[in-house]
Amino acid sequence: MKVDLVIKNIGELITMQGPQRPWLKKDIESLTRIEDGVVIIKDDKILDAGEKTLLSDYDISEDTEVIDAKGKLVTPGLVDSHVHLIFAGWRENELALTLKGYEYIDILKQGGGILSTVKKTREATEDELYAHVYKLLDNMLEYGTTTSEAKSGYGLELETELKSLRVIKKLDENHAVDLVPTFLGAHAVPPEYKDRSDEYTDYVINEMLPAVAEENLAEFCDVFCDEGVFSVEQARKILQRAKELNMKLKIHADELASLGGAELSAELGATTAEHLLKITDRGIEEMAKSGVIATLLPGTPFYLMLEEYADARKMIDNNLAVSIATDLNPGTSATESLQIIMNLASYMMKMTPEEIITAVTINAAYGVGRGDSVGSLSKGKLADLVIWNADNIEFLSYHFGVNLVDKVVKKGKLVVNNSKIIQK
């Protein structure tokens, strides 16, 4: 069979081949590292990946493009599985409030937080949102992210939520990074519904969700189920309606208080529960039984200067599949770099390099419903990979504050070279 692209002379190749489901502790412990490996690509798919002896099985012609990895590390493209992608403006002014000791809920009550971004996002045009987010995606791609979730949630009324989801659809069509759309109309209670959260819940259920479903604009529905936001019962109603409309489920759970969001995710068969700083032992047990993926977001407690991070060690050791993500948003995790999140997962959550690479590839892919097409360098999956300025995965956790990406291949095409997007 003819080959379009070969990556050769790979010092350490991490294919994440193995169980094609979310990986648990036992799977991670058997992660394979291949020395002097190759990746073989036809069109936009992986033909094969493994030891260099595989080359003899394929037709390598003069027309085959060859990239010499020069002994560097190669991994699957990174998957960012919790991203508040669609927003207008930043909120750097809130950092000063955090430094003065204000907690997030205090800032929200003063009209800051989510509600500040809601105002700006409502006022922005589709073109303005598109241009702003396109640049964010460029940054993400240069840092190794090839697939990303994209949440709405800064509209909190029908027209802006639809506007946000339409921008996601257009970006997915035009940018190299593949996007997975998530409807997050229940991100906060908007000011016009102040002290009327039940009424807003009904608005999400009866007007917003049907409109989103009619235009087929979202694969997932998410709810911020936590203290001061939406109760467990309100979240249950929203997510049950979303399920009826054939959306898969995510839930912001147990970030600020042990409200029971983790247990709710298990009850409803959600794909992921996310944040989980305050998860209970019972929540861990029920999520593990139900196969819910724990998506952990260390960038948020880092930004908020909290002492407490999600207990990744306990979750992994108790048979939960764990992914990590940026939680990119303008107020509590202002970063497009999954690399800094990998560093924080190591230093602040005590995750091993093997656990971290699993958390940003195969487990993150299943967390956004893309485990059958990305997350590993397996035959038939999309040819999404990163060549790193590193010798091994330990270096990715160890060396922080710089971009370690050398090259990115997306769907079989070189899109980043020498850490920069190739301009076409």
Image (cartoon, grey):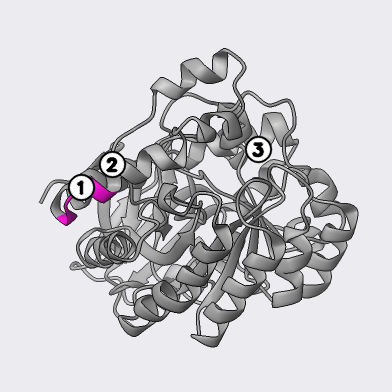
Q: Residue at x 29, y 79 (%)?
A: 2
Give the residue type at disc 1.
Answer: Ala
Reading the image, the residue beneath label 1 is: 124
Part of the protein shown in magenta: 122-126
**Chief secondary structure of the magenta portion:** helix
Q: Residue 364's image quarter?
A: bottom right
For the residues labelled 2 and 1, say whether their Cβ atoms are less than 8 Å apart: yes
Reading the image, the residue beneath label 3 is: 345
Mark 2 or mark 3, which has the lower sequence index?
A: 2
User: How far apart are the two marked residues, 2 and 3, measured between alpha carbons?
Assistant: 32 Å
Residue 75 marker: none
Reading the image, the residue beneath label 2 is: 120
Q: Is residue 352 magenta?
A: no
Observer-side mark, 1 or 3, equals: 1
Q: From where the camera sits, is residue 64 visible?
A: yes
Q: Residues within 10 Å of mark 1 (few under 14, many from 20)?
A: some
Q: Residue furthest front?
A: 195
| Position of residue 82 measured from the top left corner of the image (x, y, whole percent) | 51, 53
Q: Say left or right for 361 vs 385.
A: right
| Position of residue 310 measured from the top left corner of the image (x, y, whole percent) | 73, 42
Q: Residue at x 63, y 66 (%)?
A: 235
Q: Say left or right for 132 vs 303.
A: left
Q: Residue furthest top?
A: 100
